[in-house]
Amino acid sequence: MRIDVVTGHPRLLASPLQESMLRRAQDMGLVEIIVHDLREFTTDRHRTIDDTPYGGGAGMVLKPEPVFACIESLQGERSYDEVIYLSADGVPFAQRQANELSLKRNLILLCGHYKGVDERIRQALVTREISIGEYVLTGGELPALVVIDAVVRLLPGVLHDGESLLDDSFQDGLLGPPSYTRPAEFRGMRVPEVLLSGNHREIAAWRRTEQERRTAERRGAMVQRD
């Protein structure tokens, strides 16, 4: 898989992409993540990527020229399955989308900033808009990292224990069950006896019950399953 990230603030992405699972996935050749600085696609001496909005109002808007130049340059080199704009008013990101995107070959992630992007970018270039929650962030760089992490960890070979993916929260519409490790007792708090029993059928049943209980408590109702 190849993921191209288009941003006016590339340094916001640099460190997270070089740590932990994302670094390992790149070192193993399972994913290629390229960050593109929008300022490299400007033509004026000040390398301007934003301007005031028509009609007035506070904030700045990303200009269409550098975004079109960057994305069209990438599309001239290869075919992309999706051009994704990270936006507060996009479709809420969920595990189902992460699963779907993990099957793609080439993705472009466009990071908005300031007051967003010129609407013509959304009309002509963007194929999908994603939001990571009902709140506003300074830009799309952090949401892009969230999407990248959620997608890349699903690629075959990225996680040492591929079976653990099947137990992730939301894969079956439920939150994950409680997890415990050694020691069996800590400050008077004991691990549930069923987890120490070695009876895999009873353990599976306990975990399922805990998943359903936790989902009902924290989501108010059972999460819709596929």
Image: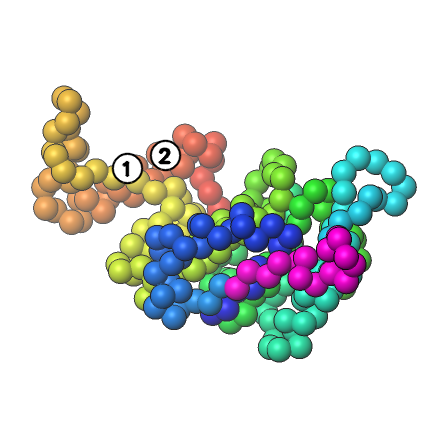
Q: Nearer the viewer, residue 130 or 35?
A: 35
| Three-letter residue code for mark 1 | Pro
Query: Along the polypeptide, which appears first: circle 2 or circle 1?
Result: 1
* Residue density around tag 2, few if under 14, some if 14–19, many if 20 or more, within 10 Å: some
Q: Is residue 149 left or right of residue 40?
A: left
Disc marking residue 214: 2
Check contact, mark 2 vs mark 1: CB within 8 A.
Answer: yes
Q: Is residue 133 left or right of residue 112?
A: left
Tell me if residue 44 is in the magenta stretch: yes
Q: Is residue 205 left or right of residue 79?
A: left
At which x and y percent is residue 155?
Answer: 39, 64
194 relative to 146, above or below: above
162 relative to 214, above or below: below
Q: Residue at x 46, y 58 (%)?
A: 151
Q: Nearer the viewer, residue 93 or 55?
A: 55
Q: Residue at x 43, y 67 (%)?
A: 31
Q: Which residue is under mark 1?
A: 178
222 relative to 159, above or below: above
